[in-house]
Amino acid sequence: MLRVVLTLLLCGIVSNPICSRGQLPQQSPGSTPVSPQANVAPEEVAAPVPVAARSVVYRTENAQAITDYEANPGTVRRMVDDLVMAVTGEQTVSSAWGSLVKPSDVVGIKVCANGAPLFSTHPAVINAIVAGLVEAGISPRNIVVWDREENLLKRAGFRSRPDGYHLMWSEGNYDPKAVITSPISGKLIFGDLFFVSKPPDTLGEASTPAPREQEKDRKRPRTLDNLSDESHLSNVLTHAVTKVINVPVLSDHFFCGLSGALFNMTIQNLDNWRRLVMEPVSGDPSIPEAYADPRVSDKVVLHIMDGLIALYAGAPIGDANYAIHYETLYASKDPVALDAIALKKIDQWRVEAQMEPASKTAKYLQTAFTYGLGNADLNKIEVVDVR
């Protein structure tokens, strides 16, 4: 029954019709203007490159970080600062962030709002990142926080402020020229770029549309019953930001096993995504293929996984029966290694609960290694505890 309910939700039979978008960030006075990035044709995935012999995942834990689902901003700030200094090898917060981004960048912070408000990326983590970026000389108006849906972002506690970061969302805001294809077709729903809410009247006599509507109709790709084998990247990723800090949650996923770093930068940035994670593919190889696209991976400078609350079953909706106050943050420049460590922990919790391991479904991590995206072998990953 649970599988049926989740399938109906993900297919959009029960959906929330939000179709808004944030505004593009404006350059602050004195900063180097960032020109809108040109629309680019679909790019072929580059040949796999050799993966480093070993990868490092940094970990920090603090029992004061969260209590009864409420994060402690001061403690979380110190945890984020310690992590970014450890990853970069820098001695100060400003120099650490400054080694990853420049004042001329528009920095995107990609959160995961699935399961909001309890099981999404915590605003305290994002506020700590924003504070560090500001110390490094990034104007708050050149910082964008985004995910797929406006309503989930706001339920998670994210808000734009006149003196703060921009809040943007992808739903209804996809790049028609940034196409990722897959042999599997999916049914478009409200919010997907080329969803058609009402099929054309092929039998009755319809009135002649206005010239402007005729022009729009000629430009729109024809779909049969709203089926398509194409997905489109978020305009936020392709046009608004120049560098990305990826902040996923430590969570399973009902269909593909793991909602981690790779998932958050790919599936959460695409329309028509349901076909890419549901059976029989379960994200393999669609998630590694999408992340290997330079339009996705080339902008990411750091991954920070929010494990303050860990969810080992029930995602993407979330269920408190399967949630743990884990009080932990991870960081790495290797998204595959980060996901492998998260998956190992989720498997431990699931086995203790007499559930099937999530790794039985999340096979896309091994494929990600073959694409040269990082290390999936736990024997080649070092976990460094940051105190």
Image: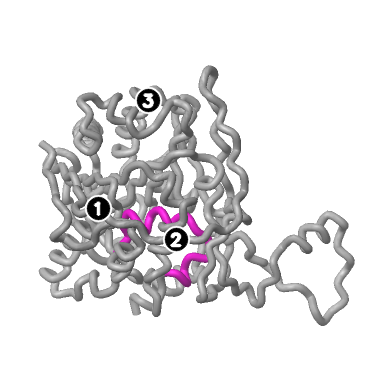
Residue, disc 1 = 52
Q: Nearer the viewer, mark 3 or mark 2?
A: 2
Q: Position of residue 344 (x, y in %)?
A: 17, 62
Amino acid carrying label 2: it is Ala
Q: Which residues are magenta?
A: 258-276
Q: In the depicted view, which residue is nearer to us: 350 or 276?
A: 276
* Residue at 13% over, 45% down: 384
Above or below, comparing residue 348 to residue 301 in the picture:
below
Residue, disc 3 = 134
> For residue 290, which numbered disc appears in the image?
2
What crowding class fits label 3: few (fewer than 14 Cα within 10 Å), some (14-19), or many (20 or more)?
some
What crowding class fits label 2: few (fewer than 14 Cα within 10 Å), some (14-19), or many (20 or more)?
many
Quadrant for residue 109, please give it: top left
> For residue 86, which numbered disc appears in the image?
none
Q: Does the rendering let one see residue 314? A: no
Q: Position of residue 1 (x, y in %)?
A: 34, 80
Circle 1: element type: loop
Q: In the depicted view, which residue is nearer to us: 362 or 148?
A: 362
Q: CA distance from mark 1 to mark 3?
A: 32 Å
Circle 2: element type: helix
Q: Nearer the viewer, mark 1 or mark 3?
A: 1
Q: In the depicted view, which residue is nearer to us: 321 or 187?
A: 187
